[in-house]
Image (cartoon, rainbow, N blue to C red):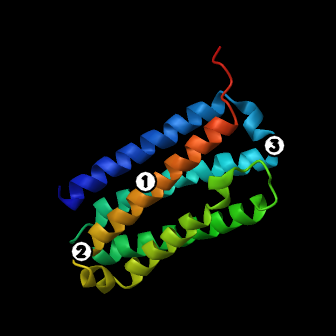
Amino acid sequence: MDTSTFYALFSATCFTLTGLWWTVVERNPRWLREEALRRRVGSVYLAFLLPALMGLFAQIGGPESPAFWRVAFVVIAVLGGVTTVRFLRGSRLDDDAGAFARYWWVTAAVYAAVAVIGVAPGLARGVGLSPLQAEATLLVLLVAVAHALVWEFMTRHRAEPAG
């Protein structure tokens, strides 16, 4: 699969997951009443939204305009890293966070790697990948981690029955 097709599918999928998450949250208003739960709800939202945005910028810039997507990836990765660190600081004393949420720092490390490849794309070429392929791999990791966070969140905080 070429990277253009990947990023088109990836972005659409991530935006769909963002919308699905909104629907789940809308049906569980109690999650927004408690600060700790609201933080986790927001971290899931960003875990799907930020990769979706990076995917869009990769499509806009593509191999033809690498500076465009690289700057976008760095800016969004920094935003993702900062919000992840803020989430971690706020949840470190939260006993109900679950084991996976306590290791959410992995996400900050992946965001850092996204930013590094954006700044130094030659690192990707050093391992036989194009910079867009390396970034795609990291974005897949971000979404996989997000899915794990959603799974843990949903099993710890059961959704309210519809209706």
Name the secondary structure under disc 3: loop
Residue on which disc 2 sits: 129
Q: Is residue 144 above or below residue 25?
A: below
Residue on which disc 1 sits: 52
Marks 1 and 3, how far apart at CA: 27 Å
Q: Nearer the viewer, mark 1 or mark 3?
A: 3
Marks 3 and 2, how far apart at CA: 44 Å
| Crowd around label 2: few <14 · some 14–19 · many ≥20 (10 Å) | some
**Nearer to me, 160 or 13:** 160
Callout 3, which amino acid?
Answer: Glu
Name the secondary structure under disc 2: loop
Q: Say which residue appears at 66% left-offset and 28% top-offset.
A: 159
Quarter of the rendering occupied by the C terminus: top right
Question: Residue 91: image x %, image y %?
Answer: 76, 58
Question: Residue 28: image x %, image y %?
Answer: 69, 30
Q: Say which residue appears at 64% left-offset and 31% top-offset.
A: 26
| Dot label at residue 34 | 3
Question: Residue 79: image x %, image y %?
Answer: 57, 68
Which residue of the protein is positioned furthest toward the front in this rendering?
A: 99
Q: Say which residue appears at 47% left-offset and 59% top-offset.
A: 142
**Nearer to me, 46 or 40:** 40
| Crowd around label 3: few <14 · some 14–19 · many ≥20 (10 Å) | few
Callout 2, which amino acid?
Answer: Leu
Name the secondary structure under disc 1: helix
Quarter of the rendering occupied by the N terminus: bottom left
Callout 1, which amino acid?
Answer: Ala
Q: Say which residue appears at 32% left-offset and 70% top-offset.
A: 134
Earlier in the chain: of badge 3 and badge 2, it is 3
Do tag 3 and tag 2 residues touch (Cβ < 8 Å)? Answer: no
Q: Nearer the viewer, mark 2 or mark 1?
A: 2
